[in-house]
């Protein structure tokens, strides 16, 4: 039985008492690490036969009941009891496993976290995501995942990742150079993105047969972090009459302009905004549409993997209205000679995202952004097909959402894309998308 209680150990002042360690019982000590200002449990067994003292650190004492990184007195006592029995049987390797130490003879360099993660980024991930996303994930690897670099991937446990995510939140909040720090910032999103990066990496290892199971898939960030997500109210427009009104304002936006505004207006930006409304396509992917992607005979636009966020070929059927938009822009482009469908007549390059945001700001009274087209479509389909799980999953896949296409061998076809048009027609979301 322990000589002290958990609270007594938490309150014990080593510096005031002039001690470096405190004997608790059953070969278990509480040790004060002055430099780190930490109280850690240590197992010490005085071996009279060998005339040595065998020592192993068990873990840091919990600071309070919310501290998930430390261990309680009860847990430390149980581990010390197990270590005593194992030491008497001369099972040092088993003791080292309990203490989280792994001998070099059991170490497999091919299973090193850092090696596998770099291979994953170079040979798989960089081909699936945009360059910006890959850079961000490498930043997480170098800045936040250092404690895992020299770990054997098969020995990493859920509890270890949970403790790491807690430390990441604190580190992100304390970072003086963090430009994101503002009112309401609590680093929740940073932790969530790191966890997502790790989750996708572990799923990749499972698919490769390196791991049997993804040990971190069940980690719930909401229940883990002491500082929760700052929830922002998000209004999604689901009134069909209002959406039709917005569409018509976008479609005939140029007619509302006069004088200088009309003369300097990039008409292709109006068509780009309308195109995004009808297709629910990502802003960047739509802006990068080239004439070479358009197949007039098959009536489709085929986006190659390198311009799609999820790095897979994307097929978009050409509806009646989209065909009119393309033919109009083709005619306007005869004197410009731009390779892009939605071109800037002065630079011949593709339009910037500001072109769309300005139109939406005026046409919808700043109530809709370019990404909201995707949110509106998904919300409307979820409302209309609430009992049809397969259709909702199909829409997620068509919209290229990570959760529904990462880790599976998904083939995107024109049949899937046509299905989305049929769904939109059914719920009367797009009365202007009649096919040829």
Image (tube, rainbow, N blue to C red):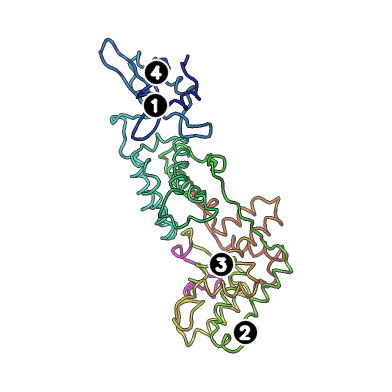
User: Residue at coordinates 50% horizontally, 25% vertically from top-left?
Assistant: 7
Asked if residue 358 is positioned above or below residue 234 in the image, the reply reads: below
Is label 1 in a helix, a strand or a loop? helix
The residue identified by callout 4 is 23
Is label 3 in a helix, a strand or a loop? strand
User: Residue at coordinates 73% horizontally, 64% vertically from top-left?
Assistant: 239
Q: Nearer the viewer, mark 1 or mark 4?
A: 1
Q: CA distance from mark 4 to mark 2?
A: 83 Å
Mark 3 or 1, nearer chain start: 1
Q: CA distance from mark 3 to mark 2?
A: 31 Å
Q: Nearer the viewer, mark 3 or mark 4?
A: 4
Magenta range is 289-308
Mark 3 or 4, nearer chain start: 4
The residue identified by callout 3 is 316
Q: CA distance from mark 3 to mark 4?
A: 71 Å
**Label 4: how many Cα within 10 Å (few below 14, some 14–19, many 20+):** some
Q: Are marks 2 and 1 in contact (CB under 8 Å)?
A: no
The residue identified by callout 2 is 257
Q: Is residue 36 left or right of residue 383?
A: left
Mark 2 or 1, nearer chain start: 1
Between 246 and 228, which is closer to the camera in this rendering? Answer: 228
Is label 2 in a helix, a strand or a loop? loop
Asked if residue 356 is positioned above or below residue 181 in the image, the reply reads: below
**Label 2: how many Cα within 10 Å (few below 14, some 14–19, many 20+):** few
Q: Nearer the viewer, mark 2 or mark 1?
A: 1
Q: Which labelled disc corresponds to residue 16?
A: 1
Q: Nearer the viewer, mark 3 or mark 2?
A: 2
Mark 3 or 2, nearer chain start: 2
User: Residue at coordinates 59% horizontally, 75% vertically from top-left?
Assistant: 359
Q: Is residue 280 left or right of residue 338?
A: right
Q: Is residue 105 left or right of residue 59?
A: left
């Amino acid at each position: 039985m322990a000589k002290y209680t958990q609270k007594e150990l938490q309150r014990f002042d080593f510096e005031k008492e002039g001690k470096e360690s405190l004997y608790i019982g059953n070969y278990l000590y509480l040790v004060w690490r002055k430099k780190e200002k930490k109280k850690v449990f240590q197992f010490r067994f005085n071996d009279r036969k060998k005339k040595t003292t065998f020592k192993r650190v068990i873990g840091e004492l919990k600071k309070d009941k919310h501290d998930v990184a430390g261990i309680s007195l009860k847990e430390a006592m149980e581990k010390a009891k197990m270590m005593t029995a194992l030491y008497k049987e001369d099972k040092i390797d088993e003791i080292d496993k309990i203490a989280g130490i792994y001998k070099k003879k059991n170490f497999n360099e091919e299973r090193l976290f850092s090696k596998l993660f770099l291979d994953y980024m170079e040979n798989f991930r960089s081909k699936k995501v945009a360059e910006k996303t890959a850079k961000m994930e490498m930043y997480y690897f170098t800045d936040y995942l250092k404690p895992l670099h020299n770990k054997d991937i098969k020995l990493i446990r859920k509890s270890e990742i949970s403790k790491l995510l807690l430390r990441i939140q604190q580190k992100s909040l304390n970072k003086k150079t963090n430009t994101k720090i503002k009112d309401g910032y609590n680093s929740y999103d940073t932790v969530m993105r790191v966890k997502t990066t790790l989750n996708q990496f572990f799923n990749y290892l499972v698919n490769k047969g390196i791991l049997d199971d993804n040990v971190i898939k069940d980690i719930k960030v909401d229940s883990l972090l002491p500082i929760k997500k700052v929830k922002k109210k998000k209004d999604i427009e689901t009134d069909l009459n209002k959406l039709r009104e917005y569409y018509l304002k976008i479609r005939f936006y140029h007619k509302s302009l006069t004088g200088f505004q009309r003369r300097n207006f990039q008409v292709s930006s109006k068509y780009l905004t309308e195109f995004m409304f009808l297709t629910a396509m990502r802003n960047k992917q739509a802006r990068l549409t080239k004439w070479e992607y358009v197949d007039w005979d098959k009536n489709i636009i085929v986006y190659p993997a390198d311009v799609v966020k999820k790095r897979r070929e994307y097929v978009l059927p050409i509806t009646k209205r989209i065909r009119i938009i393309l033919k109009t822009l083709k005619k306007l482009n005869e004197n410009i000679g731009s390779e892009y469908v939605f071109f800037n007549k002065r630079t011949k390059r593709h339009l910037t995202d500001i072109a769309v945001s300005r139109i939406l700001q005026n046409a919808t009274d700043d109530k809709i952004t370019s990404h909201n087209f995707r949110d509106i479509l998904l919300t409307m389909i979820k409302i209309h097909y609430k009992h049809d799980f397969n259709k909702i999953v199909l829409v997620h896949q068509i919209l290229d959402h990570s959760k529904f296409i990462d880790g599976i061998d998904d083939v995107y076809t024109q049949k899937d894309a046509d299905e989305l048009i049929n769904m939109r027609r059914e719920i009367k979301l797009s009365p202007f998308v009649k096919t040829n």
